[in-house]
Amino acid sequence: MAKYDRAVSDPLFDLDGRVAVVTGGMGQLGAAVAVGLAERGMRVAILDVETEPRAGSPGIATAVDEGTVRVHACDVTDRGALEAALALVEVDYGVPHVLVNAAAIDAPPDAPAAEVGPFEDVPLDSLERVVHVNVTGVVVCCQVIGGAMARAGRGSIVNVGSVYGLLSPDQGLYDFRREAGETFFKPVAYSVSKSALLNLTRYLATYWGGSGVRVNTLTPHGIENAQPEPFVEAFAARSPLGRLMDVSEALGAVVFLASDASSYVTGANLVVDGGWSAW
Ligand SMILES: NC(=O)c1ccc[n+]([C@@H]2O[C@H](COP(=O)([O-])OP(=O)(O)OC[C@H]3O[C@@H](n4cnc5c(N)ncnc54)[C@H](O)[C@@H]3O)[C@@H](O)[C@H]2O)c1
């Protein structure tokens, strides 16, 4: 047999037969993670308020059709709904081994002007709405699903943060919107919410350290998603790798954090940002 004529398989990264819950799994990153984990033999349940695959997401549509990924309608801020979804997952598959908290909201490109206006005037209800989903939602998922993992004595939680929770947004990326006459600032709510996850991760890593549940943050940045060309160019000019990230490039980090390859890694923040935070 030639040395490299078969796929590399390493038991360190083996996830076959284990159970994953991916919140926000109908979204761009969550769908790529859900499909990627299912392709590695995991039994995957998505919890999302959306239950229909998005147009242009053929991988998740096929995985849902073929039943390799199951979708549960569930709001991550609703503890009763989460408990009901977990009960169904446990009947289907057993106690989850992996929880990826990817559900989140941000101000959409067509957000009301006040929400993306000057910091001094940002309406507090928009901040509270974002924090409710992005922070409270992750806390409740960790309570319900992480709690079940802790009772089972094993598990790995991946909280999906953002470079905007680690560093301030570079408002210069959005100059093109201001040059077009808009008042636009990347709002503070998303940054505040994502930075909270860094310490939620550290808190839970220590809290569950003796229960066999590891908790880490994954910090991606700049996933390519048909953004306007001036944004893509401004991003590339600031990125050490000179480009946005393909969504598939998050998967390796999730597989590492989910698998026994990271058995001594907890409370950490794995930054997948093309070097953005390196200068
Ligand atoms: N896209 C990026 O460039 C980028 C960069 C850094 C970090 N992230 C993070 O990655 C994660 C996924 O981002 P994405 O770009 O795929 O976003 P997305 O909007 O495509 O997906 C988010 C998903 O979360 C779901 N969701 C929202 N509120 C929910 C709720 N209350 N309960 C259950 N589900 C809910 C949505 O229905 C959607 O399917 C988020 O945590 C985001 O902050 C994204």
Image (cartoon, rainbow, N blue to C red):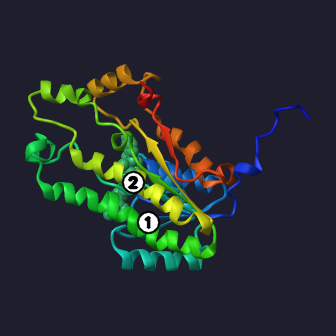
Q: Is mark 1 within 8 Å of ligand 1?
A: yes
For marks 1 and 2, give the CA distance. 19 Å
Residue 25 makes an appearance in the image: no
Given residues 30 and 171, the one toward you in this image is: 171
* Residue, disc 2: 197
Given residues 260 and 81, the one toward you in this image is: 260
244 horizontally vs 41: left or right = left
Q: Quadrant of residue 242?
A: top left
The local secondary structure at tag 1 comes to strand
For the point 44% across and 78% down, the residue is 83
Q: Residue furthest top?
A: 237
What percent of the width, then of the height, locates residue 137? Answer: 35, 64
Contact, mark 1 vs mark 2 (Cβ under 8 Å) = no
2 horizontally vs 275: left or right = right
For the point 31% across and 61% down, the residue is 133
Q: Quadrant of residue 134?
A: bottom left
What percent of the width, then of the height, locates residue 43? Answer: 61, 64
